Structure formats: C-alpha cells, structure tokens
Image (tube, rainbow, N blue to C red):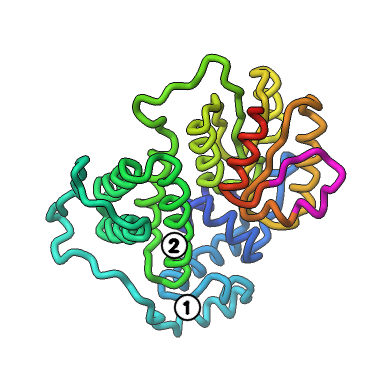
C-alpha cells in the first residue's frame, strides 16, 4: 500500500530532502500523487530508495545509478564492492576532544583561502566549535562583508565540490552548514538597524529547499542597513506576498538554486509579481536565476547573479 514521504523516509533511511532531490534532479523514481498533491510511495519505490542508499554509500554516484531499473539496481547491489573514494582521515580516538580554534584580536591575520581551508578541516574533525571560531576570526579580520564575500561564499562552493569528489562526507558538510546557518541568522553583535530602514522580505518559493542562498541575502541586507524579515525556505508565493504586503516591505528577495528552467517556477514568479504592489520591488537571485530571466523578460524583476550584484540592487533600492 502506498505510503507518504515521511514513512518512505523512515523505511529507507534517507532524509525527505534527499528523496526529493533524487526525484527532481536525477529522476530516480516517480511517486504517485494524491488529490492534494502529496507524494505517495509504493513498495517498489521504497525498495529502490533502499537500493540507491546502499549503492551511494558504497561509492556509486547517484547520477550514474538513478535511472537503472530496480532489477539492475539489485544486481549491482548484490555484486557491488565499495568504490574507491578519498575518505578523510578521522581522529584515532573520536571521543577525544579536539582543541577549539582560539581567536583573539591579536590572532595573526590570514588569507581568506586559509579560513576556508581551516573551516573545512574543522568540519572533517566534526569540530563544530572549531568551524565557528574560524568564521568568527574571519569576521573579526575581514568584517561582516568581507567574511560573506571572501570566506562564506567560497566555503559553500568548496564544500559542494568536495562532496561531489568524495573528499567530504555528508556529515562533514552538515557540520559546516549548520554553523554557517547559525552565523548568518545571528546579527553582528552591536549592530543596529535604523528606525527608518527599508524592509526586505527574504524567502524561497515552494519546492526550493536550499536555504543558504536566502540566508546570505538576509545577512548581506542587514549589513547594508535593511530591516530583514526572514521567512525561510519552501513557502508558497501567496504566503510570501501576504507577509510583504502586511509588513509594507520595500522589496521581496527570492533565492532560486534548483531546478533550472522549470515551467512551474516560471508561473510562480509571474504569480509573485502579480501579487505584489507595483511599487514593491522583486529581487531574484541564486544559481538557477539566470535560467528564468530569459523566460520572463516582460515582468518587473531585478535579477542578480552574485552577491556583489545583490549589494548593488539593495543599495539602489535604498536610494
């Protein structure tokens, strides 16, 4: 009997996020839908998820096995041997505490790339405090904007590349991502938002579960003197618009990372623009944003391709 994604996640041992990504990005399976558009997974779908989990844990790339038939997955799983992948060396005694990376105003300055390397090294040791201290020192030396542009952005890219190459475990990436999220959500100590500051509502539309881009937008806007209302990821455009209108916001910023060129997202962006007052600006950025710009030449959107472009858009909106 078909089951919802929550139960499929529990039965397969995969997170709901991973299941959705494997469906959308790699077409690993096609669950049925209820009348209310809920995903439902049959017994074979759950079986495929279990097999895919086994194969990817043994080093197979999801892109290489996702579209195999269930029978082919079974044959591969039965005859598979772990694929050689560069696995980071863990401490000999995982229970032994690793000294946290200490910082002080007198700590010697480093190049931004060194901060990126140190943060990744700390995440490989599962050293949450170490990652936090590296980023705090980067902020102390480079300032908030320097940390965002020169450390956080390159760190996110490097983590993604290292994971794809097998140099980072998913748990290593999650350690670093959790600390990055924490720092981006927390205003810089001592910072104050002017009473007459323009307001920016930040979110990602329903179906977009990648949050770090939106968090970067929120942190950058705060640093430029905006009041930020952060709604988080995966929210219907009607709800985002309702908040922005109720808050009398100056602008709404949406982050789009995946998928690219999706007709559903095109319609969501059109709907978002229709719902917002004409004078309220709509800013759209993220890795997938460029694929929608050509599809929507007729609507009033400020498209940004990088953090520097976002800064320019935000400064223009303040004028």
Q: Does residue 104 appear anywhere in the picture? A: yes
Q: Is residue 298 magenta?
A: yes
Q: Is residue 153 left or right of residue 68?
A: left
Can residue 1 be seen here?
A: no
Span shown in magenta: 292-303
> On the image, numbered disc 1 is attached to which residue?
77
| Principal secondary structure, stretch drawn in magenta | loop
Question: Residue at 62% of width from left, 35% of height from top?
Answer: 314
- Count neighbours of disc 2 (C-alpha within 10 A) and say few if under 14, some if 14 to 19, many if 20 or more: some
Q: Looking at the image, is 291 positioned above or below residue 213?
A: below
Find disc 2 in the rendering and name its residue.
Answer: 158
Q: Give the vertical position of 22 relative to 59 (above or below).
A: above
**Label 1 SS:** helix
Quick one: SS at disc 2? helix
User: Quarter of the image holding residue 229?
Assistant: top right
At a point 54% along the width and 24% down the height, the residue shown is: 227
């Amino acid at each position: 009997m078909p089951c919802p994604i929550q139960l499929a996640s529990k039965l397969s041992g995969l997170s709901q996020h991973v299941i959705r990504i494997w469906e959308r990005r790699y077409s690993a399976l096609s669950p049925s839908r209820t009348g209310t558009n809920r995903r439902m997974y049959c017994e074979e779908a759950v079986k495929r998820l279990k097999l895919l989990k086994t194969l990817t844990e043994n080093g197979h790339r999801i892109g290489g096995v996702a579209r195999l038939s269930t029978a082919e997955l079974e044959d591969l799983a039965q005859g598979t041997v772990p694929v050689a992948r560069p696995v980071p060396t863990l401490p000999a005694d995982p229970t032994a505490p690793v000294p946290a990376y200490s910082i002080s105003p007198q700590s010697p300055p480093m190049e931004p790339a060194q901060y990126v390397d140190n943060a990744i090294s700390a995440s490989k040791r599962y050293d949450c405090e170490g990652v936090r201290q590296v980023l705090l020192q980067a902020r102390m030396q480079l300032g908030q904007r320097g940390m965002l542009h020169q450390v956080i952005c390159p760190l996110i890219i490097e983590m993604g590349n290292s994971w794809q190459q097998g140099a980072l475990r998913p748990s290593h990436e999650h350690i670093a991502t959790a600390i990055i999220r924490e720092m981006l959500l927390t205003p810089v100590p001592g910072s104050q938002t002017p009473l007459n500051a323009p307001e920016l509502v930040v979110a990602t539309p329903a179906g977009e579960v990648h949050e770090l881009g939106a968090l970067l937008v929120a942190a950058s806007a705060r640093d430029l003197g905006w009041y930020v209302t952060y709604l988080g990821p995966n929210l219907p455009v009607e709800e985002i618009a309702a908040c922005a209108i109720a808050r009398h916001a100056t602008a709404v910023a949406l982050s789009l990372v995946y998928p690219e060129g999706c007709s559903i997202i095109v319609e969501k962006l059109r709907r978002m623009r229709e719902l917002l007052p004409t004078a309220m600006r709509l800013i759209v950025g993220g890795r997938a944003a460029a694929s929608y710009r050509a599809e929507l030449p007729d609507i009033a959107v400020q498209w940004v391709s990088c953090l520097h472009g976002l800064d320019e858009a935000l400064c223009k909106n303040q004028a």
